[in-house]
């Protein structure tokens, strides 16, 4: 299966397309009968109207009540065609406060010099970009005024796979388009380095729907439509929304401070495969293996060490590095946290205070750390051999294996082995081992001292540099 990339990591086969990824040049206004759109008096739909007693849902009540709070977003940059019609990125947004705060996607307004908001009653406003977060793909806009219609914010946690959902947006510039479908999956991760666990739906959404609201049948917004799966650039049955609780956390930070700071631990982590789980004494592959601890980081201050396996954060089990990233993203910078780690077969709980990273860098610190840490070619955590240890086993040099995973574990190398040579060249220190493995080809012959005996192993190296 061809794995394509979005924001630096692999996705499901095909392409996950940012919905406002199309720049429409010279596009005539295509909205149907906008002059006949009247401002609607807001009234909450009754449960009977929405659920219709087991029959097909009555979406009209949701649209009539909350549709006026959904806005058309047009973003222009310098150099855009200034002729007739649209000449910039088109998207959608929705008003979350009566004084004119609007949520949309970052990629709708990214690098825009001018943003125009159009309401369903035909009014247009110039909008200020209060702040953006590229990592979370959220932007907060502001239009001047008061008494604007607003959406109702819901709780995505209460939604279920199979529930009906409704999208309102401006696909291809067609304002106030309503589509519906069901939730196909929850907590869908599309990228190893993204903290977002998307809501997957089969709601038809297309370029221009970006930044628009995803409603449940109570008329509550539970997500922001952000991406589609597509081989063609148009809708093909899979769409993805950012959970609204994640977006609102970002929005609150932006409104309060003007920027976003993500909580961080200061570790680079990697997934655990079956071989590593067996070596670590785990019953199944779970947790996040610490490949590197940043100097001066909260993790280092708390005592986290290379080779630890993070299995829980604040009592919540961690199954994968992606889940750790998502859990950390829910924390505020400076918040106290407790990490549960597995070290040498024993469980330890470490207390720390999360650090912060300014979103000016635009990528979550955990994502940067993970991307900066290459997949280990050999897969060993090692330390220098002390003079006493060297004298005891009768060698002049070498490094002690504290943890073996991946290629090393597959070849038969284990904790406690002393690596004394690679491809016939003696190993004297950790840095030299790293350099030798980095220069090696697809295979390497590793000689170790194990209990006074010398053993040779042929290791199939990964196509990346050693840690």
Image (cartoon, rainbow, N blue to C red):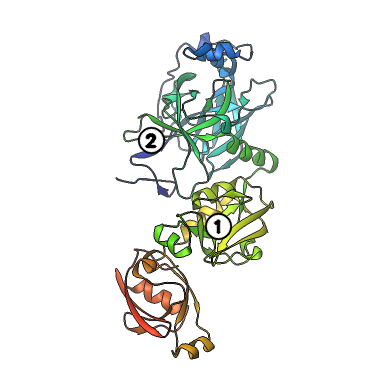
In this rendered view, identify the residue nearer to me: 129 or 177. 177
Q: Secondary structure at mark 1?
A: strand
Q: Residue at x 40, y 26 (%)?
A: 26
Q: Quadrant of residue 114?
A: top right
Percent of width and height locating residue 14: 33, 39
In this rendered view, identify the residue nearer to me: 343 or 231. 343
- Check disc 1: other Cα within 10 Å, few if <14, some if 14-19, many if 20+: many
Q: Quadrant of residue 96?
A: top right
Q: Is residue 123 visible?
A: no
Q: Is residue 379 left or right of residue 268?
A: left
- Could you tell which of marks 1 and 2 lies nearer the N-terminus? 2
Quadrant into which the N terminus falls? top left
Could you tell me how far apart the alpha carbons at marks 1 and 2 are, in whole angstroms? 32 Å
Quadrant into which the C terminus falls? bottom left
Percent of width and height locating residue 193: 48, 50
Percent of width and height locating residue 171: 43, 25
In this rendered view, identify the residue nearer to me: 273 or 6. 273
Q: Secondary structure at mark 2?
A: strand
Q: Nearer the viewer, mark 1 or mark 2?
A: 1
Determine whether 155 is above or below 398 in the image. above
Determine whether 197 is above or below 184 in the image. below
Q: Is residue 305 visible?
A: yes
Q: Which residue is mark 2?
A: 229
Q: Which mark is residue 310?
A: 1
Percent of width and height locating residue 296: 63, 66
């Amino acid at each position: 299966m061809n794995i394509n990339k979005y924001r630096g990591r692999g996705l499901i086969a095909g392409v996950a397309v940012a919905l406002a990824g199309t720049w429409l040049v010279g596009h005539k206004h295509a909205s149907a009968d906008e002059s006949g759109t009247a401002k609607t008096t807001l009234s909450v739909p009754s449960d009977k109207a929405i659920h219709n007693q087991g029959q097909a849902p009555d979406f009209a009540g949701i649209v009539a009540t909350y549709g006026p709070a959904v806005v058309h977003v047009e973003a222009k940059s310098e150099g855009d065609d200034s002729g007739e019609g649209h000449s910039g990125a088109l998207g959608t947004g929705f008003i979350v406060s009566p004084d004119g705060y609007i949520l949309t996607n970052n990629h709708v307004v990214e690098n825009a010099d001018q943003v125009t908001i159009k309401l369903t009653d035909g009014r247009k406003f110039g909008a200020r970009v209060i702040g953006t977060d590229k990592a979370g793909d959220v932007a907060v806009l502001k239009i001047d005024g008061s008494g604007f219609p607003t959406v109702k914010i819901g709780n995505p946690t209460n939604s279920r796979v199979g529930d009906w959902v409704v999208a309102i947006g401006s696909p291809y510039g067609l304002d106030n388009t309503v589509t519906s479908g069901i939730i196909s999956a929850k907590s869908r991760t599309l990228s190893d380095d993204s903290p977002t666990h998307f809501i997957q739906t089969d709601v038809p959404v297309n370029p221009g729907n970006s930044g628009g609201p995803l409603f449940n049948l109570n008329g509550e917004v539970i997500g922001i439509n952000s991406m589609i799966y597509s081989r063609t650039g148009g809708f093909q049955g899979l769409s993805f929304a950012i959970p609204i609780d994640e977006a609102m956390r970002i929005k609150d930070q932006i409104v309060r401070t003007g920027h976003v700071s993500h909580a961080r631990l200061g570790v680079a982590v990697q997934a655990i495969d079956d071989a590593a789980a067996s070596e670590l004494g785990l019953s199944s592959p779970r947790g996040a293996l610490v490949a590197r601890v940043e100097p001066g980081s909260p993790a280092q201050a708390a005592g986290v060490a290379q080779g630890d396996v993070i299995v829980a954060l604040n009592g919540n089990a961690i199954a994968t590095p992606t889940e750790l990233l998502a859990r950390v993203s829910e924390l505020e910078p400076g918040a106290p946290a407790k990490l549960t780690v597995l070290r040498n077969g024993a469980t330890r709980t470490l207390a720390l205070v999360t650090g912060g990273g300014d979103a000016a860098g635009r990528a979550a610190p955990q994502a940067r750390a993970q991307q900066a840490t290459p997949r280990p070619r050999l897969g060993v955590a090692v330390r220098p051999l002390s003079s006493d240890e060297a004298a005891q086993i009768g060698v002049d040099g070498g490094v002690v294996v504290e943890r073996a995973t991946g290629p090393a574990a597959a070849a038969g190398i284990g904790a406690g082995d002393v690596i004394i040579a690679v491809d016939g060249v003696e190993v004297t220190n950790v840095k030299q081992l790293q350099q030798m493995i980095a220069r090696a080809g697809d295979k390497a012959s590793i000689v170790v001292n194990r209990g006074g005996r010398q053993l040779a192993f042929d290791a199939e190296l990964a196509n990346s540099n050693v840690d």
